[in-house]
């Protein structure tokens, strides 16, 4: 009874923070890409280099980003369903896979379509969305980490809430680290900054050519076949 009461009190304490995080994520998801589009257009006009596929790449990245965050939410729900105690979690598994399957399909299709554009040659839109993903994912991961330590140092037991926060920390902090690594490679350059993320292969220089030693006395042999010879008398 005391454990259930402590869990309910902890859930009430975490509810305002969860509502604030959800409001921030929804606001960024709705209005963030609009700001990114205006910024991409402004940067293109400033650079003077036209990108005929800017709108197409922006739409593909937008849907891929939405599917990515839906997949992260589904992955967190799946981990929560696995680690949470109790039985009768069939309905939870159905909800989780109803998120993961369409998110995986949409994400895979749009990433495949992006490979057919000039996204590798002109990665401006990809850089904007990668930074946007890093910001949103890092924000959720950071707040989940703070909430996790609140539960860790709190008095009493809060098993259901702790399992949920642990799932969020595991998924979003891992994605935070992966996105940060990719963004650093894209911006700062590195071994995987070539086309398509593959390292550029540089062939080592060959050994220097060995010159033949000159003959003694400074006179070399005459070149063969360079001159004319008198005809041979057959008589």
Image: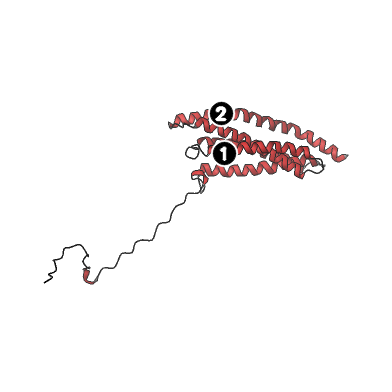
Q: Is residue 101 left or right of residue 161?
A: left
Label annotation for residue 111: 1
205 versus 1 height, above or below: below
* Farthest residue, direction right: 1
Label annotation for residue 147: none
Q: Is residue 148 left or right of residue 57?
A: right
54 versus 184 height, above or below: above
Residue at horizontal 45 percent and vertical 29 percent from the top: 45
168 versus 212 height, above or below: above
In the image shown, does 50 or 174 lie closer to the viewer? 50
SS for dot 2: helix
Residue 148 visible in the shown view: no
In the image shown, does 100 or 148 lie closer to the viewer? 100
Residue beneath label 2, please? 35
State which quarter of the image contains the N terminus.
top right
Residue at horizontal 65 percent and vertical 44 percent from the top: 174
Pointer 2 or 1: first along the chain: 2
SS for dot 1: helix
Residue 181 visible in the shown view: yes
Picture quadrant where residue 161 is located: top right
Picture quadrant where residue 156 is located: top right
The spot of residue 143 in percent (x, y) is 69, 37
Residue at horizontal 59 percent and vertical 33 percent from the top: 63
């Amino acid at each position: 009874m005391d454990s259930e009461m402590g869990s309910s009190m902890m859930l009430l304490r975490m509810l305002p923070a969860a509502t604030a995080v959800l409001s921030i994520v929804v606001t960024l998801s709705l209005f963030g890409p609009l700001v990114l589009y205006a910024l991409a257009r402004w940067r293109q006009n400033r650079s003077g280099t036209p990108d005929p596929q800017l709108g197409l790449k922006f739409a593909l990245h937008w849907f891929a980003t939405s599917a990515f965050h839906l997949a992260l939410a589904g992955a967190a729900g799946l981990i929560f369903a696995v680690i949470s105690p109790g039985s009768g979690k069939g309905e939870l598994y159905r909800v989780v896979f109803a998120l993961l399957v369409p998110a995986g399909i949409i994400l895979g299709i749009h990433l495949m379509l992006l490979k057919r554009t000039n996204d590798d040659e002109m990665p401006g839109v990809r850089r904007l969305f990668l930074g946007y993903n890093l910001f949103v994912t890092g924000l959720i991961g950071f707040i989940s980490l703070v909430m996790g330590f609140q539960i860790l140092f709190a008095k009493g037991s809060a098993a259901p809430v702790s399992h949920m926060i642990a799932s969020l920390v595991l998924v979003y902090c891992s994605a935070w680290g992966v996105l940060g690594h990719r963004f650093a490679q894209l911006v700062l350059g590195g071994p995987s900054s070539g086309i398509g993320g593959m390292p550029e292969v540089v062939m080592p220089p060959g050994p220097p050519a060995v010159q033949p030693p000159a003959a003694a006395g400074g006179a070399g042999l005459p070149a063969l076949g360079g001159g004319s010879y008198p005809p041979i008398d057959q008589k």
